[in-house]
Image: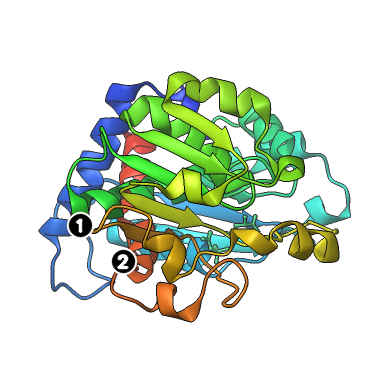
Amino acid sequence: MVRHFLDIHRLDATELRAILDDAHARKAARKGWPKGRADADAPAKDRVLAMIFEKNSTRTRFSFDAAIRQLGGSAIIANSTDMQLGRGEPVEDTAKVLSRMVDAVMIRANDHEDVERFARVSTVPVINGLTDRSHPCQILADLMTIEEHRGPVAGKTIAWIGDGNNVCHSFLHAAPKFGFHLNVACPAEYHPDLHDLARAGNNATLTSDPREAVAGADVVVTDTWVSMGDQDYEERLEAFEAYGVDDALMALAAPDAAFLHCLPAHRGEEVTDAVIDGPKSLVWDEAENRIHAQKAVLAWCFAG
Ligand code: CP
Ligand code: NVA
């Protein structure tokens, strides 16, 4: 069976825990090393990762490239507009061709179904690097960051404030797998998909009140109010006005609460400068941890 990493809910809790443990171990083992040096075990030696981007990216692009190098492999990166895919070549034909040329494919796509279609015919592992529906790699990095600074994520309460978007969905998928509780606070018209909410079962609650969601929370997380591809910018700014994370909201969380944001941030909208640059913010470690978490994902894919 080819090991694809498409969504957190598709893996079992033991596999996910092992991936996160490997991410922690790989980070610890290379402390102080130059960023291009390969890990001692080099599990991707001689392997090539293709990366396809249909949307902009800074973190995902650089962290996957650094990750595959640190595993001993190399990357080929393309924007879909430079590929025949961008001129209408079928996803399935692209998947068959790339399966002959590379050892794994990471895709950032507009439409989640395109990644699923790619994976259905690909004979090499496919990794979801963000779609309109989910962002699983981000959440592994987020959980890793929480554990680094606050200990095991199991039993913690995480408050998601703002848009019930792709990143929120992956948090919902992760909650029952890692045993944390997610309090989601969204305006009624921007709630997460109810199917994704249901996947979290008793591990998630939905409210429209950000103060209720953050009360006593161990971690407060937010994201942009306008994701890539969203067209209703003005309506969103109005709907989310009461959902900005500021010091007053953080003060309602646990005294040592951490703040996370996948970035890019829109300072003055979903988060204030004081919070994102303040002592509770872990966003720069969170960004770095994209490398370590994705190395563990790639190693898991190749071990299959
Ligand atoms: N957080 C994240 O995925 O960032 P990029 O869009 O820069 O890749
Ligand atoms: N929700 C954001 C995440 C960016 C990393 C988006 O999809 O644009």
Q: Residue 19, located in which quarter of the rendered image?
A: top left
State if disc 1 and disc 2 touch (CB < 8 Å): yes
- Is residue 3 visible in the rendered structure shown here? no
Q: Note whether 23 is above or below 54 in the view shown.
A: above
Q: Residues within 10 Å of mark 1 (few under 14, many from 20)?
A: few
Residue 25 locus on image (x, y percent):
15, 49
The residue depicted at 75 percent of the width and 56 percent of the height is: 239
Q: Note whether 199 is above or below 174 in the view shown.
A: above
Residue toward you, 233 or 67: 233
Residue toward you, 28 or 198: 198
Colour mapping:
rainbow
The residue depicted at 31 percent of the width and 26 percent of the height is: 15
Residue 109 locus on image (x, y percent):
69, 49
Q: Note whether 279 is above or below 104 in the view shown.
A: below
Residue toward you, 226 or 250: 250
Residue 250 locus on image (x, y percent):
40, 62
Residue that numbered label 1 is attached to: 149
Residue that numbered label 2 is attached to: 285
